[in-house]
């Protein structure tokens, strides 16, 4: 088991708290201009090049159905250590936390039609529920084919 398995980056989106495992993040960079790609879902901001590799940037505010807001200069992109070459744009990183495995609860699951498959667990952080997201699952299942086609072009 790696030392980072129980450590999470904490970030807010629209007054809700989310976390991502340290082991899922390769790099955190300042927000930058993303080149828009036609025919991809609205939550895809576009692509950037990082270390010679094309990275698809997902705007988490849009993906989570939040109201757009003016940029503050604190936005950042978490380049994920995943096979899909994703960058997750968030409002800011508010810190990190170490969570014991026994403190992580299963994700909410209303039914098979209504579930957030990208949430792999929850825990309490400063009295609020914090959802742990899994980057490879952030893409909606019905959008997978669009991403595959875009990846082949790159």
Image (tube, rainbow, N blue to C red):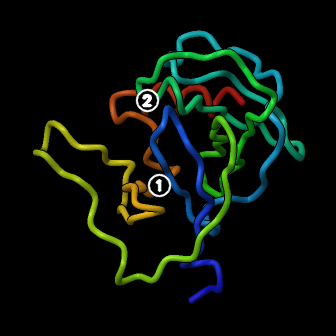
Position of residue 123 measured from the top left corner of the image (x, y, whole percent): 38, 66
- In front: 140, or 63? 63
- Name the residue furthest right: 51
- Give the vertical position of 15 relative to 47 (above or below): below
Position of residue 70 measured from the top left corner of the image (x, y, whole percent): 68, 15
Residue found at x 54% / y 78%: 6
- Give the vertical position of 118 relative to 141 (above or below): below
Upstream in the sequence, badge 1 or badge 2?
A: 1
Badge 1 element: loop
Position of residue 2 measured from the top left corner of the image (x, y, whole percent): 62, 85
- Give the vertical position of 137 relative to 34 (above or below): below
Is residue 91 rendered to the left or right of residue 29?
left
Q: Which mark is residue 21?
A: none
- In front: 80, or 65? 65
Q: How many other residues sit within 10 Å of disc 2, few (<14), some (14-19) or many (≥20)?
A: few
Badge 2 element: helix
Is residue 22 rendered to the left or right of residue 130?
right
Quadrant including the N terminus: bottom right
Residue found at x 83% / y 38%: 30
Q: Which mark is residue 145?
A: 2
Position of residue 51 measured from the top left corner of the image (x, y, whole percent): 89, 47
Q: How many other residues sit within 10 Å of disc 1, few (<14), some (14-19) or many (≥20)?
A: some
Is residue 77 rendered to the left or right of residue 138?
right
Q: Which residue is mark 1?
A: 134
């Amino acid at each position: 088991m790696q030392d980072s398995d129980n450590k999470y980056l904490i970030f807010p989106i629209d007054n809700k708290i989310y976390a991502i495992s340290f082991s899922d993040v390769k790099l955190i960079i300042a927000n930058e201009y993303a080149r828009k790609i036609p025919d991809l879902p609205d939550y895809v901001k576009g692509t950037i090049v990082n270390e010679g590799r094309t990275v698809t940037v997902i705007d988490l505010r849009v993906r989570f159905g939040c109201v757009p807001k003016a940029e503050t200069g604190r936005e950042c992109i978490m380049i994920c250590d995943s096979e899909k070459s994703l960058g997750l744009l968030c409002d800011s990183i508010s810190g990190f936390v170490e969570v014991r495995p026994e403190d992580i609860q299963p994700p909410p699951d209303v039914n098979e039609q209504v579930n957030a498959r990208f949430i792999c667990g929850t825990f309490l952080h400063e009295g609020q529920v914090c959802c742990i997201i899994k980057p490879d699952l952030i893409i909606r299942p019905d959008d997978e084919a669009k991403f595959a086609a875009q990846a082949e072009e790159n």
